[in-house]
Amino acid sequence: MADGKETQVQLIKRLKTEISVHKSTEKDLREALRRANVAWEQAFQFIGLLTLDGTMVEVNRAPLNFAGIEKSDIIGKPFWGAPWFSLSEDLQERVRCAFSRAINGEHVRFEEWLRGKRGILRCIDVSMKPVRDELEEIVFVIAEGHDITERKQAEQGRQESEERLQAILDNSPAVIYLKDPQGCYRFINRKFEELFHVERERFLGKTDHDLFEKSVADEFSKHDRAVIKSGEAIQVEEELTYDGNLLSYLSVKFPLHDVDGEAYAVCGISSDITERKKMENAIRESARRVRAINKELEAFAYSVSHDLRAPLRSIDGFSQILLEDYSDVLDATGKDFLARVRASSQKMGQLIDDLLKLSQLTRGEIVKRRVDLSRLAQEVVDELREEQVKQDVEVIIAPGLMAQGDQALLRVVLKNLLGNSWKFTGQDTHARIEFGALPPAEVEEDNEASGTVFFVRDNGAGFDMTFQGKLFGAFQRLHREEEFPGTGIGLATVERIIRRHGGRVWGKGRVGEGATFFFALGV
Amino acid sequence: MEKKLILLVEDSPDDELLTIRALKKNNILNEVVVARDGVEALDFIFATGTYAGRNLSDLPQLVLLDLKLPKVDGLEVLRQVREDERNCMLPVVILTSSKEENDLAKSYKLGANSYIRKPVDFNQFSEAIKNLGLYWLVLNEVPTNERTP
């Protein structure tokens, strides 16, 4: 190095310089080391240095703070024995395995929930990376940990909410789907899959034209376009034939907007209304049939009223003419027979009239409103007193009985029931007729649903309960004509009116001990 | 004053006989012309067809009109009669078997003067004929010479 020409002074000078350079280098080095140390210690990440047998030789503050321990607690000990891995032996085993992969040259990454001080759990993204020297020999493993708990929780929350939504959509009885503005399916729910036998994964991206016949698909697309164009929800009935069945849907379709307010999809919720439609059609059909039957009935009644009565007039009229013009050639028996012919034809005329009245009752509309039954009963009794003068009748009418029904028809009910009582009472005794309502406590259970139970009670002839099945049949009579005249249409009329009100009527009685007729008008 | 005639529109021969008998029995002695279907009735009133040439001003004093008639029914006869201004004074009494609300309403709407349902009992029928004869032929007043042909 010295060529001998260098002076001592020069040498000293050079040495000084060199020392000074060295000094400043040392200073620089110290500074660099200090910085590295700060970075190491203060790093947000968990960082540790492991030897090839897994012993922890260095560790920064972050994991120590997390676990609430000091460096001396873990330095020189196996990495997997650290307190944050103490959650389970399985976890420790997984860490040990990861470490052996790392010393074999692999950069291992995994996520684990680790335990910190006071039992706090954080999700840590762990990295174990082999460190090589200049000869490419693995000399250390650097272990790092990054706290990703927040991200993980947000991710989980998102996943849960997505799963929740999916579960709701999949368990909905409605068909739910999402299509982009081009008509490609972006989402379908399970109902959609089941109904049209498609698999979600394979079906997405397809259009209605891939699934339905053209006319149906065109119709659907038209509705979707209307939604995109207007930007507003619509409600439409959609029909399609699938698997040979006609299906009807009530579809609500609405646009989904992105942040710029552009519609990026149409969402549809289609509810199956096939059954409802069928029912509606069935109802319409039966209403039509009822109308037709009614019309036929009307025609029948008209014909009965015209054509059946005409011959009766002839029978009666000519019998009368015989009696008038040929009385000198008829003996008493002959005249009696003709009188019977006339009586019969008149009776039949009466029967026809009653039958027609009954049929008219079933045809007209029922107009329900609040009816004062007590007042109605009083009016009927007043009429009866005028029409059929009768001595010694006591009539008791409970005041303020109100009902919901057709006033004209309820008058017919009361006229028939009170009229019957009027007819069947007081042959030899004091007649007593009562109109009232049963207190709720006395109403039998099976009648509770029918509402207030009204009754007409008398102390008249009564009837044999054996024949109660015949009480309400048309032309059924429980008394002989000579005892009590009548055609047997009154109670049939009552029954029909009550039935048309949705209520029910029944009678109780005993021969010679009076009768009670109960009725309820339904609620 | 000459007794004016009654037009009885009735297709049943029995009813015709019974009605005429009831009229006679009650001393209603007007001439009775019987039309056996709706066409005949219109022909008589408007002096057409078989009654062409009849003096139109010779209006019946009363028309007894059945509703159920062959060819043209009673309601249609009534409608055509009332359509002609000249017949506004002509009393038309519906005499029929039907007591249908519908028929009643339609008859009055078309301008029937009365609606009587033939009772089965001949005595009642006779009573009804007596009353309507008394009312329409005796009590009821109409302006004279109202109709000019």
Image (cartoon, coloured by chain):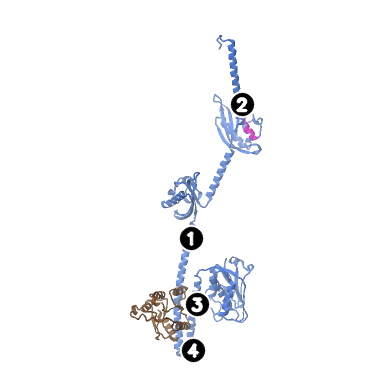
* Discs 4/2, front: 2
Q: Give how far apart the Cα atoms at labels 1 and 3 are.
A: 40 Å
The first of marks 3 and 2 along the sequence is: 2
Residue picked out by circle 1: A280
Q: Is residue A58 magenta?
A: yes
Q: Give how far apart the Cα atoms at labels 4 and 1 are.
A: 68 Å
State the mark number for residue A34.
2
Instruction: Name the amino acid type tagged 2.
Output: Arg
* Discs 4/3, front: 3
Instruction: Name the amino acid type tagged 1.
Output: Glu
State the mark number for residue A332.
4
The first of marks 4 and 1 along the sequence is: 1
Q: Going 64% across and 38% down the picture, which residue do you hit? A: A120
* Discs 1/3, front: 1
Q: Are marks 4 and 3 in contact (CB under 8 Å)?
A: no
Tell me the magenta residue range: A57-67
Q: Are marks 3 and 2 in contact (CB under 8 Å)?
A: no
